[in-house]
Image (cartoon, grey):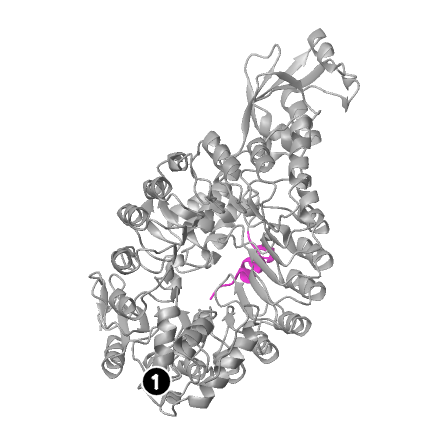
Amino acid sequence: MQVVWLSSSLALRDLQAFILHSCSMQMDPKLKKTKDSSSNSANSPDSTHSSFPFPDEVLERVLSLLHSHKDRSSVSLVCKDWYNAERWTRTKLFIGNCYSVSPEIVARRFPRIKSVTLKGKPRFSDFNLVPQYWGADVHSWLVMFAKVYPFLEELRLKRMTLSDESLKFLATSFPGFKALSLLSCDGFSTDGLKAIATHCKNLTELDIQENGIDDFGGGWLSSFSENCSSLEVLNFASLSSDVSFDALEKLVRRCKSLRILKVNKSISLDQLQQLLVHAPQLIELGTGSFQQELTPWQYEDLETAFSNCKNLQALSGLWEATSLHLPVLYAACASLTFLNLSYAALQSGELAKLVAHSPNLRRLWVLDTVGDKGLEAVGSSCPLLEELRVFPADPYELDLHHGVTEAGFLAVSHGCRKLHYVLYFCRQMTNAAVATIVLNCPDFTHFRLCIMNPGEPDYLTNEPMDEAFGAVVKTCTNLRRLAVSGLLTDLTFKYIGKYAKNLETLSVAFAGSSDRGMQCVLQGCPKLRKLEIRDSPFGNAALLSGVEKYETMRSLWMSACNVTMSACRLLAKDMPRLNVEVMRDEGSDDRQADKVYVYRSVAGPRRDAPPFVLSL
Amino acid sequence: MAHENELNLKATELRLGLPGTDESEDMVSIAKNNKRASPESVEDSGSKANSAAKSGDHETSSASKAQIVGWPPVRSYRKNNLQSKKAESESGMYVKVSMDGAPYLRKVDLKVYNGYPELLMALENMFKLSIGEYSEREGYEGSEYAPAYEDKDGDLMLVGDVPWDMFMSSCKRLRIMRGSEAKGLGCAV
């Protein structure tokens, strides 16, 4: 028998090569058929000759070094021994759709989970397309976790519903609980946060972002015990009410390991200065309100405080920042890699000066108040830029003279050749501009362009924007995520189906001419996982053409398209492992399926569906 | 489908028509989307037709624009943040202006002005007086009037010393002082 000593410095790549080599030595040909890389498969493969030359302990030791859940899923499909070794060594659970599996199934398979990431509602719920009380309640999961994973340490929720009772239950059921992250969740209030602060004695992370939360005041922050000194991450930027500055200051002072601090608007500039003095080790900072009359001494103190933050990599907040106070940041800008100005309505000159001091920026988020001129400055000052997001300051403004145009995007693409992630809201675009942009930056992995007027053509030629997105998919072979907009015919989707071979997520709105468009995408994109479509003329033929595809995907969303109930029922009947759910708009025809949500699941139809969700 | 492009074209279109013909009808009918213009909104926009096209657009557009649910795709939290900012910026920043010896006060909207010169000119017009040139050393030389304001702390300050933005956020009311009192205020400290 061979014994292999594995050094912990073994590179992950080598490790994976080792495992895959062993996999290929004994892969059961029957198993190769399953391309399903979902981590939620409850089917254990048939046992085969397991002539793996190493003892179980070695296998488990090796597998415990694997962290990616995708790799773990692949590994678990090799044979029964590997499946078991994997399930015993998995400590991090990632569930991309909470309804694709049930708490019971998860509990049976994985005995030793310490960290859970759970995602719930379809993404379009962020834009009010999903009614309240739709579901994705975390409580039944928490009850199971309390039984099976009493040593749970981390919980990260996205688009889930949770009540204050659930938060209280969480706070009191897991003595070793360390990290809570809530993004785009709803159903709870600051009372729930109070419970967390009060009971979680070893809390290292409290990250509350952009939730539908009832804010009953900032008293929750004062509920941290005076012994609590373990916080490393505290983000309450999206809460509106005042917190006790005294409590906050004391908390920051005693949490020496604090590396991420994002405060809310109620914290003023001079208060911020006092906090920074206690926490110069911060790596990420979210400021409070950035507008206040300061005496020259206060201004200087603030400047000094920022220049003492030598490790600052990310900066956000900056509400109401103006040219008056932005200069205090200049000293800290040199080390910044992420600058989030999406809540500061800066003008072009203000942004230009700021980015001139920030040559190391990799990620930049701005409001379109900076205009094309501001983006030109970005192009010249930030050669290392990899990600740009431009949000609309006034999404409902029709006037073309506001915001950014194709010129700004072009300018950035000329200067920032490493750009690979873009989210760009604009009111006008041309095919030619996009073609040039992707020639400059062929490495796009995420291309999300939102021309804000639905069905807007190329404003110079009046043609559809098909060629723009055609250029994107032809040139950017690594493209994983695409959001299209503007006037688009089926040609766009033909291009996508033909060229976007690595595409995983596609968002479509007000686009396409016929079923053919959607069919091209479903037939042509082998790695497609999430498809979300609204207000587009795709009907039953399109829906049903993907019958075999949907089980390889996480989900499909279609709203305000041309799909009928009968087609949905047909889909549900043919594919028992798909959940087909329909929501109807008020006053619409009984035959229309206004909102359709299709997703694969091993848990069967939802048992908690509200009356307005029809599970077919 | 009507695009904004058409809106702009219509605005510059040459037409035969009696002077004073209401443009508002066109603006409302062009205004995007499915909602048909009701007679009331035509009246409304008529009165706004004289003000800057922008604000007129805003009135009609917020009335007749059928805001498509969830479009543009901006998350609620971000939208709410921006909307409150907009509400603040639209409400205007009216401050009282008193002039020594005048029987009643006036009010001005500070947001309307881009800087001190515009504000002072407006005050000169409003009260039919001349204020003179600002200098850091002498204050407002060459005039028996000095524009002053009351700041957040209740102190009486000379207009013009601090940057415009700072002035806007700290000015609670304006006072046009005259005579010997004014001279005292004009001395640099």
Residue A379 in sight in this render? yes
Depicted A27 relative to depicted A15: above or below: below
Residue A502 in sight in this render? no
Q: Which is more toward the observer, A38 or A433?
A: A38
Depicted A611 relative to depicted A6: above or below: above
Q: Position of residue A568 (x, y in %)?
A: 27, 77
For the C terminus of chain A, give its image quadrant: bottom left
Report crowding for label 1: few under 14, some 14 to 19, many 20 or more residues within 10 A (C-alpha): some
Q: Chain of mark 1?
A: A
Location of residue A278 (image quadrant): top right
Which residue is farthest front? Answer: A1
Q: Position of residue A242 (x, y in %)?
A: 44, 34
Give the extent of the magenta segment. Answer: B1-17
Measuring 33% from the left and 60% from the top, which residue is drawn there? Answer: A130
Q: Which is more toward the observer, A492 or A186?
A: A186
- Residue A114 appears left or right of B161: left
Location of residue A582 (image quadrant): bottom left
Q: Secondary structure at mark 1?
A: loop
Q: Position of residue A29 (x, y in %)?
A: 39, 92
Q: Is residue B6 magenta?
A: yes
Q: Which is more toward the observer, B73 or A272?
A: A272
Measuring 38% from the left and 54% from the top, which residue is drawn there? Answer: A153
Q: Position of residue A6 (x, y in %)?
A: 52, 73
Location of residue A613 (image quadrant): bottom left
For the N terminus of chain A, give its image quadrant: bottom left
User: Mark 1 — residue?
Assistant: A548
- Residue B152 appears left or right of A201: right
- Residue B47 appears left or right of B187: left
Q: Is residue A325 magenta?
A: no
Which residue is farthest bottom? Answer: A29
